[in-house]
Image (cartoon, rainbow, N blue to C red):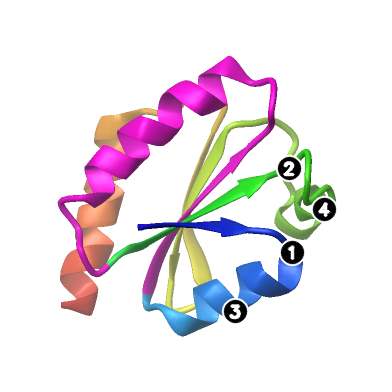
């Protein structure tokens, strides 16, 4: 299930509540962002204990400064509230899944 994040406070609450969280940062008129999101959602179907949060940077503009984001899309993996992996602009799904699998195994 996807959680649409509407504020920086919601973002912090999400990464502190769940041990493994994937954050997808996108913008409204970014075709790559919209193409990557379903791939991330499909991937996370295989990891039921991982939570997905989506942040539309067009609506939560301060997230760019909070997460040091200079381009979109950006996909991040947080484990126990700490950023563990980041990919921006060109998302290599194999590498992303490998990193997710390592962290998922660590929390199981």
* C-alpha gap between disc 3 and disc 2: 18 Å
Along the line of sight, the residue nearer the viewer: 9 or 91: 9
91 lies above or below 100: above
To which residue does mark 4 refer?
65
| The label number, if any, that marks residue 13 in the structure image | 3
Magenta run includes residue 47: yes
In the image, which disc is placed on residue 7?
1
Q: Secondary structure at mark 1?
A: loop
Per the image, label 3 sits on a secondary structure element best described as helix
Q: CA distance from mark 1 to mark 3?
A: 10 Å
Name the residue at 70% across, 59% down.
6
Left or right side of 29 for 99 = left
Callouts 2 and 1 close, C-beta under 8 Å: no
Q: Secondary structure at mark 4?
A: helix
Q: Earlier in the sequence, mark 3 or mark 2?
A: 3
Q: CA distance from mark 1 to mark 4?
A: 13 Å
Mark pair 2, 1: CA separation: 10 Å
């Amino acid at each position: 299930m996807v959680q649409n994040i509407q504020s920086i406070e919601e973002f912090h609450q999400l990464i502190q509540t769940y041990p493994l969280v994937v954050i997808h940062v996108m913008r409204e008129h970014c075709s790559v962002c919209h193409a990557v999101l379903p791939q991330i959602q499909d991937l996370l179907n295989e990891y039921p204990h991982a939570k997905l949060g989506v942040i539309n940077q067009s609506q939560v503009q301060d997230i760019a400064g909070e997460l040091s984001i200079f381009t979109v899309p950006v996909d991040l993996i947080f484990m126990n509230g700490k950023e563990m992996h980041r990919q921006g602009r060109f998302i290599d799904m194999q590498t992303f899944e490998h990193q997710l699998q390592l962290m998922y195994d660590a929390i199981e």
